[in-house]
Image: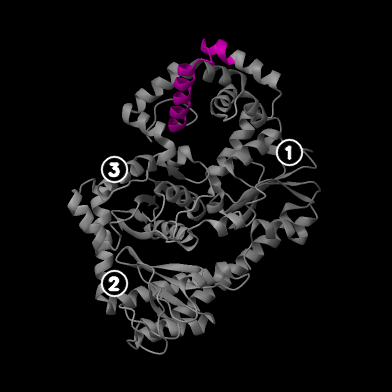
Amino acid sequence: MSIRMSDLISHPVVQRGDPVVLSGDHLLDRQIRWLHSSDIYEIAPLLRDGDMLLTTGLGLKGRTEAELRGFVRQLATRRVAGFALELCRYFTTAPADMVQEARHLGLPMLGFRALVPFVEVAEAVNSTIVDVAVHRLRRMDEVSRALSEVLAENAGVGELLTRLAAVLDRPVLLAGPLGEIVADGSHARTRDGSATAHGERDGHGQRDGHGARDLPDRAPVMVNGAVWGWLHTRHGDGEHFIEQAALERAAEIVALALLRGEREAVSRSAESRRLVGALLSGRGDREGLRARLKAAGLPLTASGYVVALAYDDDPARALTALDRAAWAVTADPSGSRTAAAGQPGGATGTPSADEHGRSPAVVSAEADGLCCMVMAAPGSPRRLAVRLAAELAAALPGSAVAAVGPPVRTAEELVHGTTEARLVLRIARQVAPRTHVADATVLGMERALMRAYDVDGLARYVREQLGPLIDADRRRGSRLIDTLEAVLTAPEGKADAARRLHLHRQTLYQRLRRIGELLDADLDEPLTRTALLMALRARRLLGEDPDPRPW
């Protein structure tokens, strides 16, 4: 099995340290890539996506509130799986500022209340990780050899899936670009839906037995840089990480078979790339966009559309993340299953299907290194955008950034949706340090600021509005600016802000008086509050330091 946060906590060696979950108790299914121990305060740049950090706290002792929060923010930006702090030597209780920041950023934080040698923890956990990696490579090689033999015999897709089902010892099927079943592991099926062997398809394009909804684990089949369809199965318990890698390897070989024998597969992928190219270029008249949508397989009668973009040094990783997010939405369009499981989609509690339970249609492709996905919403486009952003946050690798554009109602508005998604993609790391997913709809103020100011102008605006407060925080090591932001964004007013900051009301009021004096401003005046909130948003675009810098 693979090592997750929950596996780490239950490991016998770790249990000797009497671990307690301080933050992220709903995120314990995160996978740990490697375990490190270090007391260096500046360790974050040396860590990678999925790493887990153990620290005694030596490098944190005596640090200011701002520095403790900064340490947590740096770890979150690196998308580590989590971190653990020893609570029996340099710290006996976890600093409230660190716990609060970890909860705010969605970063799991553990505390070790008893002494356990970190070298023993690292040795035990990392040995298991290596074993899993070796098993994964062997399984991928097994699938490659088996399917390559079939491919060398000029066999079709149906024969490939039959062999794959035998190797995996599980049902397998291939779904096309619109979700239709093309072939399964026992009987091949042509692109028009006719069976080449036993079995007839029912009214939903599915054979007696397994359908795509019954096989929730899948991998994208990419033809000419576009996601043509999906290879489906159901992984066994405890082997998801290994079996998913094998399925993704199989999808690459299925794509080769499609390229060799399926002209329609190549044509559909080409149309997807043409649509994406037109949207990313910012060009396209009404009739031209409608024609490209139809050719790519998207309906013209949808309630609306949502565009999502993703960028990674490896476009295949970005396309896979888009696909996994789309599948999470389409496989559970009502959001009921993810809501029950406490998964990302469930956090929104918003369905993306229409009243008849129909799922969104999807087209995705890569053009000039940028990956783009268009989803046609049968129900509420806004709800679809919310679900998609949440699922992207779970699917995106730490090296990538992504953006979800504002939902649009018509095909001709897709260029606008793509342009706005591209705008906020540039600031995804600043506005979403943990997920790297920017939602254009909730970033309306940021979009307006970016269009109104260049970088220098933005920095000057921040200094004009917040300069004395920033300077005071730098001199005193305080975080008055965090207090101001909490008050301006608290939905239930000052009492709510005090709870979020873990402050007594009187302490909060004292800080607000100090802030008002420094800024020479009336913090209860609505237009003043709006100007200050815009400045805080602008500061987030620039980073912690409001000096000019490119985004």
**Which residue has dot 3 on it?**
416
Q: Which residues are magenta?
A: 515-542
**Which residue has dot 2 on it?**
265
Give coordinates of residue 463: x percent, y percent. 44, 19
Give the quarter of the image for residue 255: bottom left
Relative to 15, is 185 above or below? below
- In this view of the protein, can residue 215 be seen by the observer? no
Residue 407 on the magenta span: no
**Which residue has dot 1 on it?**
94
Instruction: State if disc 1 and disc 3 touch (CB < 8 Å).
Output: no
Relative to 315, is 24 above or below? above
Give coordinates of residue 210: x percent, y percent. 49, 78
Relative to 312, is 140 above or below? below
Q: Nearer the viewer, residue 46 or 164?
A: 164
Element at badge 3?
A: helix
Q: Residue at x 62, y 31 (%)?
A: 67
Q: Nearer the viewer, mark 1 or mark 2?
A: 2
Q: Nearer the viewer, residue 515 or 418?
A: 418
As shown in the figure, which amino acid type bears the numbered disc 3? His
